[in-house]
Structure formats: C-alpha cells, structure tokens
Amino acid sequence: MRNNSLNMNAALLRTPAVPGALAVLLLGTLVVPQAQAAIALDRTRVVFDGGQNSVSLNVSNQNKQLPYLAQGWIEDEKGNKIQSPLTVLPPVQRIEPGKPSQVKIQALPAAKLLKQDRETLYYFNLREIPPKSTKPNTLQIALQTRIKLFYRPAGIAMDKNGAPPQEQLTLTKQGDKYVVNNPTPLLRHDSGCGQQQKCRYQGASNR
C-alpha cells in the first residue's frame, strides 16, 4: 500500500535460528500491535518553489528513550528512486531521543531543465531505522512515510487575485467515466473521484 500516509515495512532485523517450516509457522501466528512512527514529519505534502534553491522539512524523533536513523530519498512519479534534479540532504541522519531536526530537499542544476509551464510530480520518502535490539529473537518494524512533492516553476506562481485552482476544474460524465478537465498548470492535489467511480483526467498539467 503506497499513499500519503505511513507505509509499514515489516523488517525481520533479527530472526531466531529455527528450521524454515517452523519459522514460517511462528511468523504466521505472531500478533504485532499497531506500530507508531518514531520519526515524524511536519507535513503531508511538499511544494518546492522553483524560485528557491531548496526547501527544509522539520522532522523529530517522537521516541523519548531511543535514537533513530532517518533515511530520506526522492522518487519520480513512477516510483523510481532518483538523485537528480532534486536530492535529499542529508540522505541519512541520526536523531536523538525526543529531539527535532531538519532534512533539506536541494535543487540541482538539472532542475532548470524541467518543464517551466507546469508542475512536476515527485514523491518524498522518509524511513525510520530503529537501533539494533539487544534482545534475541526480536521482530522490529520500520515505518516509512511517503508524501507527494510538487516542483512548481517560478513562472507559474499562483495568482492571489484569481480563482483558486480547484474552482477552475470542470467535471463531465462520458459513459461510465467522469472526465476532469484541469486548465491550470498545477497538478491535482486530490486522490481521485471516489472509490466507486472511474475517472479520466485531461489537461496540460495532468499525466
């Protein structure tokens, strides 16, 4: 499941030395309580202003007893990990118990080659890495946050006196589908037309 919320990656960082069949049986009967993220991010989406060289995000370690590593990276709209035209600094950092920190999304020279008449969609990922457990046969859960990252060129800054982008969208029904037309250069910040409806988007900024 990949969305704008927490993606839980259950990682067996340490496993007991038992036969394979028994290990499968044990894993099948494990009851894992709902995990709470230790590394927290201060937002659910990022808009990168193309007129700036970077944007900083606030992160914090919500665990009051243990330090955690925070690993950040960027993916393109197809989910491929990239290091250009945007990159994350530092890619990995240690955050002490209960302490705040920052992670920076930095634009590289290649950002100037992006389309300047519309937004470009990326995904920012932040994964927490727990400290190695001193207890044997421990199941550790690593949580990952994945949010949308919009690169917005400086030339398409929102007109404060104009209608909001969401008010410029039009919706028409064609057969069993809805067609959403977006005449703006801004990408949609929504999650679709609904779980039971089929949608097709058209417009210069929608891909």
Image (cartoon, grey):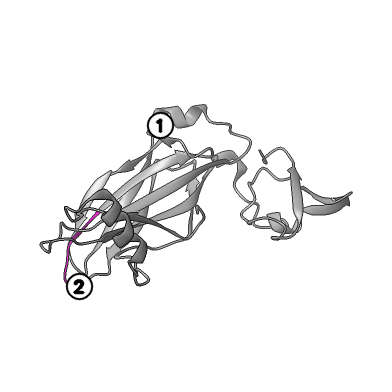
In this view, the residue in front, 19 or 124, is 19
Indicate the amino acid at tag 2.
Answer: Lys
Q: Residue 51's x, y, as percent?
A: 48, 41
- The image quadrant of residue 196 is bottom right
Q: Residue at x 32, y 59 (%)?
A: 25
Quadrant for the C terminus in the image: top right
- Would you say the residues marked 1 and 2 are in contact, meaning their CB atoms lie under 8 Å apart? no
Q: In this orientation, which residue lies closer to the viewer: 21 or 88?
A: 21
19 with respect to 183 (left or right): left
Corner quadrant of residue 57: bottom left
- Observer-nearest residue: 158 or 120? 120
The residue singled out by tag 2 in the image is 64
Which residue has dot 1 on it?
84
Residue extending farthest to the left is: 134
Looking at the rendering, the stretch of residues picked out in magenta corresponds to 64-69
Earlier residue among tags 1 and 2 = 2
